Image (cartoon, rainbow, N blue to C red):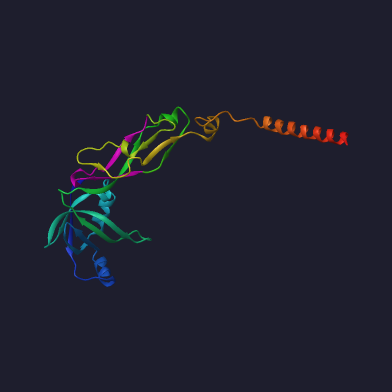
Amino acid sequence: MRKEITVIAEPRQGRGKNEARRLRVRGLTPAVVYGAQKEPIAIAVNPKHITRILHSASGHNTVFNLDIQGVETTPAMIVDTQQDPVTDRLLHADLLRIDPNKRIKVKVAVHLEGEARGVKAQSGTLEVVSREIEIECLPEEIPDSFTVNITNLMVGQHLRAADIPLSGSMKLVSNPNLVLAHVVGSRSQATATPAEGAGPAEPEVIKKGKKEEAGAEAKTEAKGGAKKK
């Protein structure tokens, strides 16, 4: 979703570790912006501004204004970042120019609300399989997230990607059958309920009785043969 946020950037000429160190001393982070059929530009940005966007509700899907001083101002999104594994400090950022009139593919989080009836009334367990779907839409229509009510979900029922309501220019990219969440029964329920189409299991006692009966017949025949001799 387009936000009224402007990130100021400055073009940079140098590359390599030494240049990166000099930038960090100034409180800046190296980055690059590309896309929209234009040449990539090496830039330096304030890491606090990028981190603030990443931690917002829309996160990576935030479309903001990137003002590269003396060069251009363009809508952009954060595509990728590199962070220090120890300090979590932003080390580098990849930014993408956005054409407001061109559809793009994004992954959007799916939030579940409500308590499934299969959990409350049938003692089932809600299992969350996936927490996001991929869609394609215009940049202005990228949602922060999707929220779906799962109150009516019963044991054995699924919430799939196709069940997520889309609007405007949104088009589902994920497999429509992708399971996001489902309610499963307990093991005791599964044991007590025979599979559909399966007949009643034959008691082990009956099998054992048949074996003993066959054994008795074999012994009788053996005795009869011995008497004839």
Give the answer, above or below, for where 69 lies relative to 183.
below
Comparing 71 with 193, the one in front is 193
The reply, left or right, for residue 11 in relation to residue 109 is left
The front one of 103 and 215 is 215
- The quadrant in which the N terminus is found is top left
Q: Quadrant of residue 66?
A: bottom left
Q: Residue at x 41, y 36 (%)?
A: 182
- Left or right of 96 on screen, residue 112: right
Quarter-of-image position of residue 32: bottom left
Q: Considering only vertical position in the picture, is 154 above or below 110?
A: above
Front-lying residue, 183 or 51:
183
Residue 27 part of the magenta-drawn span: no
| Residue 89 in picture, x, y percent from top left | 32, 60
In percent of width and height, residue 103 lies at 19, 48
Name the residue at the bottom extreme. Answer: 18
Q: Residue at x 39, y 38 (%)?
A: 181
Q: Residue placed at 20% from the left, 60% from the top?
A: 34
Q: Please provide the residue range marked out in magenta.
A: 131-151
Magenta includes 147?
yes
The total of numbered circles placed on residues is 0
Residue 9 at x, y percent in the picture: 18, 60
Q: Judge from the rendering whether residue 191 lies leftward or rightward of residue 17; answer left or right.
A: right
